[in-house]
Image (spheres, rainbow, N blue to C red):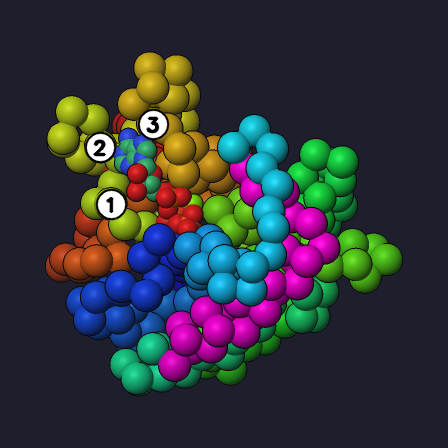
């Protein structure tokens, strides 16, 4: 049976993905891996909000997703970024279909906390059928992180958490967080393998901060399900060398390394 791999491509790196990155994806695809991608888009959303002069409110350092912000977020995530990524994959000979988490009711969510965060969802269910069908037919589903409530309202969801939920629902063997750094760094060195417990200690020590926190939390969430291994890798270079992934591996138990 062929293996499934889910990639989350950060908004931080999506427009700077290297040729090697796409070559590596192609190698996996040609080796028979089924591939699905979830992408972010924070920097592009910020630029568009500025361009359109839409006022934004901040709560605990996070931008509140008001209805006008959601409208722009959906336009950018489901529109420009999603189609940009589909085009890049096509350029490299990879057949992709761009969808959002709303299509096929892929991502079902409830409001996280409407008063505090606005139109932001907490994923409660993933209907993987549409993505599975696309992968069965040889396509790479490229998923924008939007979701629907039971009442069909649109909610924005965190892309790291969405990738983790999709990986679980697709019974992915591997989940890859593609970002703008080589992996998890400590004192200028990349840590090659960590358990969720070690990750927690690094958060407490302040070594892991900012945007890396939702990523490692999503990694830990994926590992409590069926996903065996999660990696943080860079999209700026190569993430695959002689069948081994390059970056920080987060795994249930270190012994499995031996
Ligand atoms: N210990 C650490 N090692 C590496 N990066 C870290 C660490 N702690 C914090 N970071 C930060 O995490 C960032 C990656 O997360 P970030 O949320 O910015 O990117 P992304 O998730 O790929 O993109 P986006 O959130 O736009 O989709 C790095 O650029 C770095 O600044
Ligand atoms: Mg991020």
Say if 107 sits above or below 134 in the image.
above
Mark 2, Cα crowd under 10 Å, few <14 / some 14-19 / many 20+, is some
Residue at 38%, 21% in the rendered image: 203
The residues colored magenta run: 62-87
Q: Is mark 2 within 8 Å of ligand 1?
A: yes
Q: Is mark 1 within 8 Å of ligand 1?
A: yes
Mark 3, Cα crowd under 10 Å, few <14 / some 14-19 / many 20+, is some
In-front residue for pair 22/56:
56
Q: Is mark 3 within 8 Å of ligand 1?
A: yes
Q: Position of residue 7 (x, y in %)?
A: 40, 58
Give the label on residue 82, or none: none
- First reached walking from the N terminus: tag 3 or tag 2: 2
Q: Which residue is mark 2?
A: 185
Q: Are marks 2 and 1 in contact (CB under 8 Å)?
A: yes
Residue at 21%, 45% in the rendered image: 182
Residue at 41%, 75% in the rendered image: 84
Q: Secondary structure at mark 3?
A: loop
Residue at the limit of the structure toward the right, as seen here: 151
Q: Position of residue 147 (x, y in %)?
A: 67, 57
- First reached walking from the N terminus: tag 3 or tag 1: 1
Q: Which residue is mark 3?
A: 208
Left or right: 8 as drawn, with respect to 77: left
Whole-number angstrom distance, CA of label 2 to CA of label 1:
8 Å
Whole-number angstrom distance, CA of label 3 to CA of label 1:
12 Å
Residue at the limit of the structure toward the front, as seen here: 53
Q: Is 63 within the magenta?
A: yes
Say if 199 sits above or below 46 in the image.
above
Say if 211 sits above or below 87 in the image.
above
Mark 1, Cα crowd under 10 Å, few <14 / some 14-19 / many 20+, is some
């Amino acid at each position: 049976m062929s293996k499934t791999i889910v990639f989350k491509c950060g908004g931080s790196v999506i427009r700077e993905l290297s040729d090697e990155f796409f070559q590596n994806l192609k190698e996996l695809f040609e080796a028979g891996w089924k591939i699905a991608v979830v992408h972010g888009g924070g920097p592009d959303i910020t630029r568009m909000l500025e361009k359109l002069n839409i006022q934004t409110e901040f709560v605990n350092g996070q931008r509140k997703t008001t209805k006008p912000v959601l409208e722009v977020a959906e336009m950018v995530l489901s529109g420009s970024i999603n189609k940009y990524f589909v085009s890049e994959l096509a350029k490299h000979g990879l057949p992709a279909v761009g969808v959002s988490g709303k299509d096929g009711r892929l991502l079902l969510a409830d409001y996280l906390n409407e008063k505090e965060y606005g139109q932001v969802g907490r994923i409660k269910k993933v209907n993987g059928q549409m993505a599975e069908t696309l992968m069965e037919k040889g396509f790479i589903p490229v998923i924008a992180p939007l979701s629907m409530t039971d009442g069909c309202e649109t909610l924005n969801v965190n892309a790291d958490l969405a990738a983790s939920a999709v990986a679980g629902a697709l019974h992915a063997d591997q989940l890859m967080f593609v970002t703008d750094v080589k992996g998890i760094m400590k004192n200028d060195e990349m840590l090659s393998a960590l358990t969720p417990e070690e990750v927690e200690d690094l958060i407490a020590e302040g070594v892991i901060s900012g945007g890396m926190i939702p990523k490692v939390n999503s990694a830990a969430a994926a590992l409590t399900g069926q996903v065996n291994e999660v990696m943080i890798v860079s999209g700026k270079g190569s993430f695959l060398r002689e069948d081994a992934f390059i970056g920080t591996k987060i795994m249930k138990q270190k012994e499995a390394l031996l």
